[in-house]
């Protein structure tokens, strides 16, 4: 586990952006999966800036979604797809053919999962995964107690996730379940970055990653301690209890 702690969110985000830019330079046709949510937004801005300056080029890359709220698709403000469109995909001109995103509105979510698993398998495996962490330690929608052997699946949302979800939606959305890549995708990804910032994340960061902790699916993020190529990028506030 490589732990990087920076004085502020912008510098932690710059570390994550730097790792992504290095990845795409080394392997221009990389398969990425990038979390939506609030945490990576500064990283996305830095990536957009790098593309505009000619320092990065994602044209040959492919993107698998990490997760989506069941019942929502890219037409809904606050959905994962719309966040990615507005903050990254559209700003750097990623073509739809290079994106495989969960459709949370699909009537056949089992098929959505199977299609995602085939897409990733068809590309080998995920080259680089950028994650956030939920206040309950979730990764994507891999909620506490998740079976770590799963690939893509649909899950009921943890009460904490439902509570936190209100920050994404205006008007509010009644979300009850999510569709997500599984922890097997996470553990099989060549490189995983987890970005966390703010003192509200300090307690869960400590629970998941402090020295004496053991990996447990009760705190899904803690399983990353066993990933062979894992970067934990924190600002000082998120690291304050480590
Ligand atoms: C959300 C998403 C995750 C995200 C995490 C942290 O519910 N399912 O993909 O990484 O929780 O979100 P945020 O960055 O907004 O704190």
Image (tube, rainbow, N blue to C red):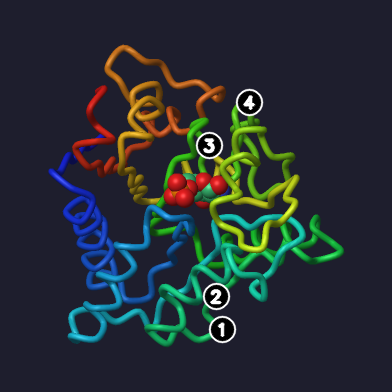
Pointers 3 and 2 in contact (C-beta within 8 Å): no
Separation of residues labelled 1 and 4 (CA atoms): 34 Å
Q: Residues within 10 Å of mark 3 (few under 14, many from 20)?
A: many
Q: Residue furthest left?
A: 7
Pointers 1 and 2 in contact (C-beta within 8 Å): yes
Precedes in sequence: disc 3 or disc 2: 2
At numbered mark 1, what does the secondary structure look like: helix, strand or loop? Answer: helix
At numbered mark 4, what does the secondary structure look like: helix, strand or loop? Answer: loop
Closer to us: mark 3 or mark 2?
A: 3
Q: Position of residue 105 (x, y in %)?
A: 78, 65
- Residue 51 lies left or right of residue 85; in this view the side is left
Precedes in sequence: disc 1 or disc 4: 1
Q: Residue furthest right?
A: 107
Separation of residues labelled 2 and 4 (CA atoms): 29 Å
Is residue 48 visible in the rendered image? The answer is yes
Q: Position of residue 43 (x, y in %)?
A: 30, 62
Quarter placement of the C terminus: top left
Q: Residues within 10 Å of mark 1 (few under 14, many from 20)?
A: few
Q: Which mark is residue 99?
A: 2
Quarter placement of the N terminus: top left
- Residue 62 lies left or right of residue 65; in this view the side is left
Separation of residues labelled 3 and 4 (CA atoms): 10 Å
Q: Which mark is residue 96?
A: 1
Which residue, given by chain and number where applicable, does mark 4 sit on? 145
Residue at left offset 47%, top offset 56%: 35
Separation of residues labelled 1 and 3 (CA atoms): 28 Å
Which residue, given by chain and number where applicable, does mark 3 sit on? 138
Q: Which mark is residue 161?
A: none
Place residue 2 in its image quadrant.
Answer: top left
When the figure is inspected, residue 40 is found, relative to residue 3, above or below; the finding is below
Residue at left offset 23%, top offset 73%: 25
């Amino acid at each position: 586990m490589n732990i990087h702690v920076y004085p502020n969110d912008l510098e932690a985000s710059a570390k994550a952006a730097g790792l992504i830019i290095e990845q795409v330079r080394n392997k221009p046709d990389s398969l990425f999966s990038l979390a939506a949510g609030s945490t990576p937004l500064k990283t996305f801005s830095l990536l957009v800036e790098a593309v505009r300056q000619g320092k990065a080029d994602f044209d040959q890359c492919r993107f698998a979604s990490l997760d989506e709220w069941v019942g929502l698709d890219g037409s809904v403000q606050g959905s994962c797809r719309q966040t990615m469109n507005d903050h990254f995909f559209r700003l750097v001109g990623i073509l739809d053919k290079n994106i495989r995103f969960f459709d949370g509105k699909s009537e056949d979510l089992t098929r959505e999962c199977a299609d995602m698993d085939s897409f990733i398998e068809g590309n080998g495996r995920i080259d680089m995964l950028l994650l956030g962490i939920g206040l309950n330690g979730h990764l994507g929608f891999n909620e506490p107690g998740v079976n770590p052997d799963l690939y893509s699946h649909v899950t009921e949302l943890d009460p904490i996730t439902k509570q936190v979800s209100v920050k994404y939606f205006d008007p509010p959305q009644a979300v009850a379940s999510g569709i997500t890549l599984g922890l097997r995708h996470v553990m099989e990804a060549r490189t995983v970055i987890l970005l966390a910032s703010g003192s509200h994340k300090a307690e869960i960061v400590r629970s998941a990653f402090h020295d004496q902790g053991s990996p447990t699916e009760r705190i899904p993020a803690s399983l990353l301690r066993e990933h062979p190529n894992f970067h934990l990028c924190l600002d000082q506030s998120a690291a304050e209890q480590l």
